Amino acid sequence: MPRSSFSPKPKCSPIWLICILLGLSAVHTHGKDVPTVPQQVSLSPNLETQQLTLSWLGGESTTFDIMILRTELNETVFYETVSVTADKISGQHQWNWTSVEPLECTSLSVQIRSRDGQTTSDWSDTHILPGMDLPSNKDSQMFPQDRVVSVGTNTTFCCIVEEGLGFGSIRYRDLVMNVTRLSRRSYAMTQINQGPSGVTGTNVFCSSDEKTLLNGAVVFVGYPPLPSDLVCETHDLVSAVCQWNRGRDTHLYGKKRKTYYTLNGRDCTEANQNQKWSACSLAQWDGNFTLVARNLLGQYSLTDSSELSLRVRPVAPANLTSVVRAWNATLLWQWKHRGYDSLALICQVELTSHWHTTTRTFSGVGLRSVIVLDLRPDEDYSIKVRCGVQQNFWNWGDWSGPLAFRTSIDIPDAPDVWMWIERDNTGRLMWKPLTHRESHGQITGYEVTLWSPDENIQHTETLPQSICTVPINLTHISTTGSSSNKVIATVIAKNAAGVSPPASIVMPLRWTDIDPPAVSRTAYMDGGFPLSWQSDANASCGYVVEWHDASCQQDCAVEWIKVAAENTNISAQSENFQPGVRYTLSLYSCSSEVPQLLQRWEGYMEELVPSSSVPHLSSNQQDSNIKLSWGEIPLVSRRGFLLGYHIYLNNGSQLMLLANVSDPTSRSYTVKGLPVGSYKFTVKAYTSAGEDTGATVSISLESYTDWLILEMLASLGTMTCFLVLVTFICYKKRKWVKKAFYPDIPEPKLAGDWSRTQGPLDVKPSPHSMVHIVEEPEWDSSKEALVVIPEEDEDEDETGDEPVDTDEPTSLRYYNQVIDDRPIRPRFPDSSASSASSLDSARTDVTYTGIQTSGNSLGFQLQPQGSSEGQQPQIDVPASCVDGGGGYRPQMQPGSLSQDMGLPAPQAFSEPQPTKGASFGGYQPQCSWHLDSPVEAEESGGLAPSLGSPTSVASTQFLLPDSGSKEQPEGKGQGSSSATTWFHNLLSSAKP
Amino acid sequence: MPNVNLSNHLIQTHLLISSWSYNRKKESLSPDLTVADGRLVTVPPPSSQLDTRDKLWRLHSALLQCRSLLERAITKEEEELGGAEKGDYQSQRKTVRDRLSLLLANTGELLKATDGTAVLTPSLEGLEIDGPTILFEVKLWIYRIFKELDYWTKTAITTLQGLPSVTAKERGRTTAVRRRRSTRR
């Protein structure tokens, strides 16, 4: 249409233009069909739910814009487009809006307009929901009041300040909250995620700027009910009683807020609010049960269903009575409901006596009496009963009220009898006082009878009930004619019901000093002394274990226990055991005869440290030592098995352990090695529990000079005795010694007849071979050497020779004692020519042997260099040596010596010369036993080669060491020289 | 001597009330907030002109109103909180009520002793005996009742401690008048 209104012609008349515009305007007006403005707007507040219900007449529109403002401050609270259909009957539109703040907090202005797409009607008139902050309400107020909300929800509170006062704060409990101003006098705050409140609710306080309390509100934050475990049962076989668990605390209290319960629609007013379990009854068993729990926050339902016969729980037995006897009682009761008469019941009887409870079970149809057996006479009992159904047992019924009764009295049990006999033949007959359980009634007294079986003499004595031991003079009995060595004692207890069976024991008439078996130790454990023993064939009626304080001497407190014959171990227990007391435990066999001691133990309940220290501690100086002595600790003070003693050196501030004497029987200890001074010693005995406080003794240790002198004298005396002994032995065995160490020089072995008497042989030097003693001015006379003088030199020798000693004979003297038949070999084979010539000329075969004494050896004391330089040896030559020295010497002439002497080198020396040292070693006395070791060999230096020939040629004798050897220490050489001289003299004196 | 015992008893009662005093802490009422006084007990204003009997009567009347208010408060608490309060609070509340009854009996006896006539029961008209219905106001109301109790037990201590001197003076005056009369005779 509009298109058709437009003309392409450029030239149009004004009239046509106006017509076109009017037409377009009309078309436009007709196409946009404006919605109607909502009419009859009404506001309907629900203050509890803070819900505002808006209703209006809005024509055919289904979409509306709704705007809600806080009237005073003209703040928009809500502005949205909502779809609302009109009620078909009334044609009204209705829409609900829930305010965050309570509707009383401030006035709200509401406007509505219809919308059709983008087309809206005009806004309706403003409708105001008046708040409580109107000037007409001058007082301070707070909203909401007494609100009940669920845990975790948010609640907004507003405070309207009293007219004329200034706002201060809003506190949730004691917490100041952030507030929003809603109007001139109204302020709001929101508490989010509220926790459960206390029993009187949660307080919200509104105060003025002067901190004066203006108003407040209480909010209850809790939970809806959540019961569980609904169970219904019957007690009377008709009605139903249902129980349930109330579940979690709702935190809602008071009439208005508490949880209400209904069972199958019936109010359960009797349900206890403060118990975890609640119960409710129905007059008739319904089979199906529904419990509804309800409070202001919600409700919860539980169901249960069952047949009546499966849920029978009997009521408590009523009117409990008893018929009591000594050893049993008949218990009777009644049932409140007749239906129980035909009901098979099972009942429990709970019996309590002396805080000990036992339960016995009985059953029967309509059970209403039972006989309770195994009671004890004269005993107090408390008894109660409960029952359940035998078939389809559901649960035990309630216990009846307790019934107390006391059983009748009966004759007492036989007393437990034992005896105690002292060394002086006085004895005691003892028995244990009967306990309440054994006496079966008040004991009125005892009757004791002594009966000698051989003589058939009987003596009876009645004793009051307070007596439980009787002294018996066994000596008196034995001297009054009894030929037997035993007496039978019998004890009878009496009460109002009669007398007990007799208790007997056989007592010996005299104390027998039987050696006790080996006493062993027993350790207390688990409240007693564990004892075990070998079974004894004589113990026909068992055993008796008896114990008492080991330190007790007279009238000892004795305890005992009787053990059956089949038992061979027991734990001896007593309330009277004391720590630190030694107990002696004895085992006796029980028979028709006198009890026999079988075994004995001793032990402590608990070992303690000794209560007293060692007595009579004393100290004595013994030589340079200190002897500590002490006495024995009395048994009563030991309080444990002594393990030993600790010896301490007490230096005032601390104790230093010197020794641990682990032998408890030891009574002394010697402290050694202490220097002179004052000392304090502490001795402490110890047990497994520790050591005692200790006894201390002081002593001053003085020097012991006498002992030193004695010691020296003793040493000297011992040495003297030793020397005398050695001398004596040597004297007595001088032959053997001489033979072993200093045999006689054998006679030369001579060819031909040398049968002449032994004696010195004066030899004239052969003209062809003569031995000439040459005195070399550079040599000591002792260093004479046998020199083979060639014939051609004889003259020269004669002219130039000077005798060594004018007293010396010019001839040579030999001992021609033949000691060996073996052929003599020349020492130097190369010199055999000269030797042979010498022998040949004399026709003699002379063996030059001899012990080279110190003097001789000194004669061979060669000075490798010094001697050639004119140093004379400073050694005297003994006369004997001089006498003998004129004899032959071993053939040894060092080359150097020959040279020094100006002698031409003989053929004998044509052989390669040994080293200087070796050659000077020559024949040495036999000292090879000194040079066995390589070390000594080294020490001997150049003498080593001589070791290869320890003896002179064909000599069977030892050669003594060359004491004059330069390599030997001077002192040693002198010592051995003097010793050998002495030895030589000794041996010489032994010669015949 | 009875007055001394009564005075001690009063002091103990007052201490009990003071320590209990509706337990601000339990209700999270911050100590820095002040609660406006709202007098619940109405008696003639104190005056130096009042004689011993009038003072006792005024005290007795106030305590009577206190007991009525306390009983109502207990009832109201039971209604609103339904046994939620347990243990110490309930036992203390009962003790305060019993001691207040004893105090009333004692002041009644004193009143009798003062003029020998029967004690007139003070009127409870105008007393806000029903109490509020909003729970916060109930709490505030109970708080004020205990404030009144606190105030009037304190007043009772003062009043009773002043009694011996007053009675002694009055006895002295009476004795002097009698002597004068006997002298004139």
Image (cartoon, grey):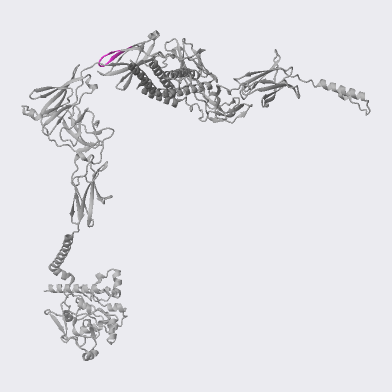
Q: Residue furthest front?
A: B184
Q: Main secondary structure of the magenta part?
A: strand
Where on the picture, by quarter, is residue A340? top left
Please determine whether, in this image, residue A99 is positioned above or below residue A425: above
The quadrant in which the N terminus of chain B is found is top left
Please determine whether, in this image, residue A700 is positioned above or below residue A919: above
In the image, A511 versus A694, the foreground residue is A694
Provide residue A761's location: percent of width, then percent of height: 14, 82
Q: Decide if residue A229 is in sight here.
A: no
A137 to the left or right of A363: right
In the image, B166 versus A107, the foreground residue is B166
Q: Which residues are magenta?
A: A322-332
Let me know if residue A330 is in the magenta part: yes
Q: Decide if residue A343 is in sight here.
A: yes
Provide residue A71's location: percent of width, then percent of height: 67, 24
In the image, A106 versus A654, the foreground residue is A106
Where on the picture, by quarter, is residue A478? top left
Q: Residue at x 79, y 20 (%)?
A: A33
Q: Residue at x 62, y 28 (%)?
A: A181
Q: How many marks?
A: 0
Provide residue A14's location: percent of width, then percent of height: 92, 25
The quadrant in which the C terminus of chain B is found is top left
Let me know if residue A623 is in the magenta part: no
